[in-house]
Amino acid sequence: MSDGATNRQLYSLTERDFQAPHYVDHDGRQHVRPADNIPLVVWPDGSWCHAANRFLREQFEKGLSRRNRGGSLAVAAAQITHLLRFCYRRRIDPSELSDNQFREFMAQLVLEMSSTRPGQRRRDANSNIAIGRKCLEFLSSVGRHADIPDLVSDEGQIRAIRRTHRVRPTGRSARVRSVDYWEHAAFPNADPLRKRLPISIGKIEDMRHAVARLSKTSHQRQRRHTILRLLEVTGARRGEIAEVTVEDVRKASDMEWPMLRLPTLKKRGGRAPYRWVPLSRHDATFIRQYADVHRRSVLRRRRPGKPDHGILLISGSDGEPLRANTITQEVRQLRIAAGITEKACAQMFRHRFITKLFVALLEQHNVENQDEFRRLLIDGEQMKQKVAEWTGHSRLESLDTYINLAFDEVCNFKRVYDLTSVSRAIDSFGGTIAAELDAVHAGEQPLLILRRLEAQLENLKADLERAKAVAPDVNLGGDRQAHIGNQAQH
């Protein structure tokens, strides 16, 4: 048994146009349905794994997402292949697995070391628990089909306990949601859940400045700027960013009030619904510029004569659509190039976007203190529902954390900024922009204009720093000040 046979990925995905049998009608005609991106699993020697593929078919029937190269189905496939490798090495069928062997399997998972981070475990405790639970779910399926009902049970061949967790939403009208899961004595103690805070505007700026240093071509440079802009202004997940189409960008930029259509991942079912996110006209134009200039140039050189697949973000080497994992790698490379030592990932842009939505809503309601905030939360379901329309959240209770972050940000902003000074600084900078536009139209040298704008931007930053003063009694006083606050934060 070679290392190559045991270490290679054990599943591949069905093709984009693949269809699976659905039902046979009364005339004997077979009907099919789309079944793209379904993982097909083999044993390490390449032979078909019937039990694993039957289990994944069951998961497919339940409606697990398969968007973005397999989605939740691919995650499930990757998790159970750890157990398949263990059974293959032991020359044992999964239906014959004992409780002692399952304990040994979990111990190996926990002790596995990283190949890229010397001295560190390959996975944290929560990841190992997730793998263990999915493997028990797989073994339970094996037991059902092998007529071994106690393969996994309290006192069964593998001694595990099935538990139910009830999630109680904060809203008065929301339903209690039940989540079933397996527990086993071999599972490690769970690590504390680490909530990622929103990325700061300072880190975003540092990453923007790193783009020029890191990029080798104009397409790569503009694509990275476009990725950062999409992450910041849409709050989309990385997989959703990867599926943005050129057509939707062009439609948005042609609207009087631009709205970008985004696929909504993390929904059950293979084909995700869509949502519409508002964009500023400037952002819509910026994103379209990448599509119409840099992207088009790459397709002309790398895919001559081939039809356009329509996906916005593409590889500069072959013109193929960018994968979600590549977006993760791009953000990681920018973080390193910017010298950012703290965590900075695509998901943190989403956290920032959601927090900013709640900041805007809280300012719109003129929330001034904790008591008003508590009263607002009594009817906060409508507010959360509005935010969920733009973020694609299925469960409103998962937005509660962002409400607290937003309130902290609003209160802190009122406390540390002299908003009158902020207003004057921003209005002044707006006048500067107008004057420089006149200079552009008059034919003045672009390099001189750019240098002046850079100097004025530094002056604006200095003005905002000077506006930081203790002002606990400042009242936002309406839409005008709320608008100024939003501008200053961006």
Image (cartoon, rainbow, N blue to C red):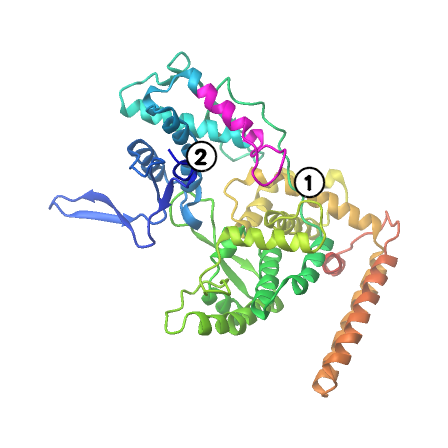
**Span shown in magenta:** 102-126
Residue at x 46% of width, y 27% of height: 133
* Residue 163 appears in the rendering: no
Q: Amino acid at mark 1?
A: Asn
- Quadrant in the picture for residue 290: bottom right
* Residue 390 appears in the rendering: yes
User: Which residue is identified by label 1?
Assistant: 404
Whether residue 223 sits left or right of residue 8 in the image: it is right
The one of 336 and 6 positioned closer to us in this rendering: 6
Alpha-carbon span between mark 2 and mark 1: 34 Å
The one of 91 and 259 positioned closer to us in this rendering: 91
Residue 121 lies within the magenta run: yes
Whichever of labels 2 and 1 marks the residue nearer the N terminus, that label is 2
Residue at x 41% of width, y 70% of height: 303
- Quadrant in the picture for residue 380: top right
Where disc 2 sits, the SS reads: helix
**Vertical relation: 300 (above or below) 64:** below
User: Which residue is identified by label 2?
Assistant: 79
